[in-house]
Image (cartoon, rainbow, N blue to C red):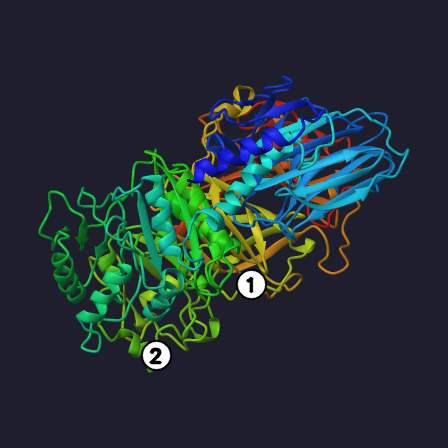
Amino acid sequence: MRVFSALILIVVYFFSIPESRAELIAHWPLDEKSGSTVADVVGGKDGTLYNFDGKHWRTGLAGGALHFNGLSSYVRHGFNLPRDRGTLMHWVKPQSFGRGILYYESDKGSSVHGPTDYNGFNAAGEALEIHTAWKGDDDEFCFYYQDGAEAVNECDSDHLNPNGWNHVAVTWDVEGELILYLNCQRSGSEDIPPGVFANFDTTESYFGRPSDNDRFFMGLLDDVRVYNEVLTPEDAEFRERCEQVEFHSSIMAQEVSIPSTDFAGHLCTALAEHGMQNIWDVVLLMQTPFGGGFVDAMQTVFGNNIECSEWIPWLAASASDTVEPSRGWSDMEADLNTVHMLGSTWTQAIAGPAGPTGGAPGVIFNGSETQDVLQDLLTARNIDIAGPSGKNKENPRVAIGGESGEVRWSDPGIRHEALLINAGGHDLRNVNDLHNMRTALDRLWQGGEYNITSFNTFDPITEDVLEAITLAVQRLDANTQLLIYVTGHGDSTADLSSLGCGLATQLIQGDMSCCFDLPPSWYKGVFGNYEPGAWSPLTFGMDVETCDGCTNWQFTFNNRAAQFGNAGFPGLGTLSTESWQLRPGRNCLEISTGGFGSMQLSGARLTTGPLNILDVNHRLRPGQTGAFYDSDRSGEGIFVELLADDRAVVYVFTFTPDGTGRQAWMLGVGEMIGNHIVVTEMDRPTGPRFGPEFNPGDRVLNPFGGLALTMPECGDSKSRGTLFMSPPVDSEYELMGSTRYVQLTGIVDCNQLNGHAKAGFSGSWYDKSHSGEGIILEVLNDGRVLTQWFTYDHSGEQMWIQGVGELEGDILNVKDLYTATGTTWGSLFDSDDVVRQDWGTLTMEFHDCDNATAMYESTVGFGSGTFNMTRLTSLLGIPCK
């Protein structure tokens, strides 16, 4: 019925809409799925891909789509938009709450007209700049047009689909107006002043970035088209695109006769119509910190019905009430029959086709009482149980117990459609929650392709949610699995994967019993008269005042240590070291009755929320760009570069964990969230060899895990920040945390923004032929320049080189560069073991704000050479003049 209705609509429009005079003059479908170019199948203006990581080919609305990383990836092509009139349209799915450029062209670099300044749009004099943009901070798509002395632009958010794909179309007529259409709805228009457009020549054309190294787009782009005439939704070419929008948005209301609040019923209907009734076609997860919230979430999302429960796997639940006399089998059986909830207070459950027993368990449990109850319940439903306590070890469907080890839900080659649903009153468009989900998927599926759609359910299920379900189901095929992840409380979506314990919040499996081996009444000892669902866990905190004199606690989770300077938990009172015990031989944390319980740990944000309270109203300042370190760990540290779109680049320099004393460094781009910087995935690149043999193609990124940094107060020398890093589970690098991070250097004053006249030279610089290594500069008030070079040695291992130079006009001289060796990563770090070694000299001559020549000469066997340097980052509030 659905397909037939769509065909009828297409036929009607084909015969009723007159053919327009517009000609398609450029079309990039972005369907390649491999290679380093994207084809213009009409005009031959193919694009070249730059700085993509190999995971950039994704599934689009029709065929493929191109994923941009928001830091450095972009496409350069040779097409010029028609200047007098035309239409540009594309599909876009943003994944960032900053700003990013979609289609862009300008005359930057033109010797006649001078550079186009992105930040000075409409104030750059005579120039050319035409682009579409995503403004995530305002939830807007925009179109900007300047060709001469004046500029026009239009933005819209009223017709935005915040959870998925958006169709953006723009038209312009120099004798009329500029018009923006968002999802085929006319969003606004702007009259074009007559006689002011100069038809300047285009010198740069991109997808995903402007001419300056800033505002890189993060998200998916698909099906970019350009026409040589102004189109309207009544024209056949435009109407074809609108058919896709209308078909997706109207199919729920017009063709599916179910209540709009019946999420489960709609899911069953959509799956049945699509023919997906295999037991592993769908994996349904539930996660909440406590049982009351879980039941509320289930009632909100599913009501009391899930008709296709016989062929949808049972849920993975992180909590319910304890199995005590007050909660009998009838309640658990009602839960099981109604929503397939299988759980108890210390239950951590995982549904999926792979498990430690080597079979295909649907759920893994721990706890003897729960185990017995569930064994009987599942046996009554003819579901066999595998694992150490099970009865069917040959073909398991449910495992109770289990052994630690690497677990994968499915082959990494399987594609996953992920629906992220919030039912607990917290906006899942918050970057923390989306980042957690992406981190979980990355670690579970090791780079397997996935697509995330997220939405909230504070109110009854909306048609947008139903639409997302149908679209996800329509994309299912033999190599695709649908994951539905429901969280009952926004603050409980933690990223604890690196701890190695099987917390359902991170959807991983490990040696769970060691983390949940608690007495049945443990929570009563912590909270007294606790009502389930009444307590909302805060960010994992470190409070010096409640530490009882402790100065260096070490928590160990499955052989992975996390060190913190002080420990206490806001809202829970004083903790003593006696509350935390390490069980000999278990290598896992055992929590006593008076301690901080496991479920509250599930509610903490260790990776995406730092170790003290998040101040969401705080704004980081330009004066907080600089170098930071822990005074007890002199010899390692971090560099932070704040950018203009609520992003930040973080560099870490340290040492390897293998005891060799070798250097290590990591980098990543993150979000500024209040007084926090959150980087969901750092990289630790290796591969290229130093000097003339340097080949960017040899670089291997080596994903390193997440980083969370709480910044110390700007300008307050006594203020301390916190740092937490969570390397991958299978890494030799242990967890690392510190509550003593201070700012060592800054480029400008925190209040007046006073700095050196050449402070604008600060930032990251690189040679385009040596992509993968680069130099960070911090021009200090007194004219000294802190210099950090991240590179590789002759064998392709990491090397960092430091020095402090002086500026003389436009020339930087660093007379003493050095490296360091001797200590190790993490808990074994010892500043006394760090040995500095002279390396050589560096000179940089700045030709302008964006270009320089660097010359180095090593005294320890690395020779000499010259780089043609280009600016990579422009810093927040520190312009180059």
Question: Residue 59 appears at what percent x and percent y?
Answer: 46, 34
Counting from the top left corner in percent of width and height, residue 723 is at 49, 56
Residue type (three-letter) at the residue carrying disc 1: Arg
Whether tag 1 and tag 2 are in contact, CB under 8 A, the answer is no
Residue picked out by circle 1: 720
> Where residue 379 sits in the image (x, y, percent)?
12, 57
- On the rendered image, what quadrant is the C terminus found in? top right
Q: In the image shown, does 548 or 269 lie closer to the viewer?
A: 269
Q: Dot 1, crowdedness within 10 Å: few (<14), some or many (≥20)? A: some
Q: Residue furthest top?
A: 44
Label 2 sits on what residue type?
Tyr
Q: Give the labeled residue for mark 2.
A: 530
> Nearer the N terminus, badge 1 or badge 2?
2
In this view of the protein, can residue 784 be seen by the observer?
Answer: yes
Q: Residue furthest left?
A: 391
Kindly report which numbered mark, 1 or 2, lies closer to the viewer in this rendering: 2
The N terminus sits in image quarter: top left
Q: Give the x, y percent position of residue 711.
A: 58, 59
Q: Residue furthest right?
A: 195
Q: Secondary structure at mark 2?
A: loop
Q: Quick check: can you spot residue 608?
A: no
Is residue 68 placed above or below 422 in the rendered structure?
Answer: above
The alpha-carbon separation of the residues under discs 1 and 2 comes to 34 Å
Residue 556 vs 418, above or below: the answer is below
Image quadrant of residue 3? top left
* SS label for mark 1: loop
- Mark 2 neighbour density, 10 Å: few (under 14) some (14–19) many (20 or more): few
Residue at image position (29%, 43%) is 409
Pick the front one: 146 or 496: 146
Q: Which mark is residue 622?
A: none
